[in-house]
Image (spheres, grey):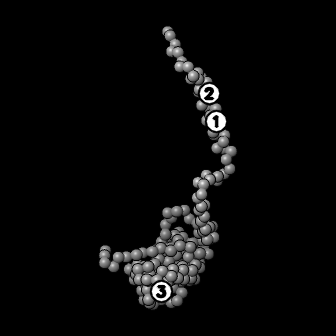
Amino acid sequence: MSRKARESGTLPRPLAVLAAFVLAGATALAIRMLPAGAEPAPPAGAAPVRFAPPPQRPAAVRQPPGSFVGFVDTARDPEFDLAAESRATGVARYALGHLVADGDGCLVRWAGPPQPADAPDAAGLGRLRAAGGDAFPVFGGPGGDDPAVTCTRPGGLATAYRKAVGAFGAAAAAFEIRDAADPA
């Protein structure tokens, strides 16, 4: 039996295997020594991206992404009790519809027949939030157009959204935009 001669300039196999293990171990040690949450440095000349922190809400409101959101049509059921329904069903988050364009198209109102100024029931919303739940408005829908469809002034549209979301104390908003040319 003849052994194959190794080419000149190559390491002996046991030495190459040992070097591979040492390299893997050193890499693992270097990674383990990195601080938690370390991020790679941005490329030279790139401006760092900064995000505003989300508004602080009670810990109970934070639910995993994809959690169920109930929907309440305030035009059909203006007396809907969010807190009682949440206790009965376990649903903690609700989308309340529908805020539609009014006046010059840059104002919003609740769809359907005229409702009290505090619609939906502000006390029910307060009890829902006190229990760790939340609710947010839905703009647009079957009762009228979203203000984005009718408002021609960007500043007026931003003001309408800001007023409605701010008055509601909402951490979110939803939009239901329909195509008037497509009844389906």
Above/below status of 8 relative to 168: above
Residue drawn at the location 56% of the way across and 82% of the way down: 167
State the image coordinates of residue 154 (x, y, percent, origin top left). Answer: 48, 80
Image-quadrant location for residue 150: bottom left
Q: Is residue 97 visible?
A: no
Name the disc covering residue 39, or none. none
Circle nearer the N terminus (2, 3) = 2
Circle nearer the N terminus (2, 1) = 2
Residue furthest top in the image: 1
Residue type of the residue flagged with mark 3: Leu
* Observer-nearest of 161 and 176: 161
Crowding around mark 3 (Cα neighbors within 10 Å: few <14, some 14 to 19, many 20+) is many
Q: Which residue is mark 3?
A: 107
Q: Which residue is mark 1?
A: 25
Residue type of the residue flagged with mark 2: Leu
* Observer-nearest of 44 and 21: 44
Above/below status of 107 relative to 84: below
Circle nearer the N terminus (1, 3) = 1
* Observer-nearest of 13 and 93: 13
Q: Secondary structure at mark 1?
A: helix
Q: Which residue is mark 2?
A: 18
Q: CA distance from mark 1 to mark 3?
A: 65 Å
Residue type of the residue flagged with mark 1: Gly
Q: CA distance from mark 2 to mark 3?
A: 74 Å
Residue drawn at the location 66% of the way across and 51% of the way down: 36
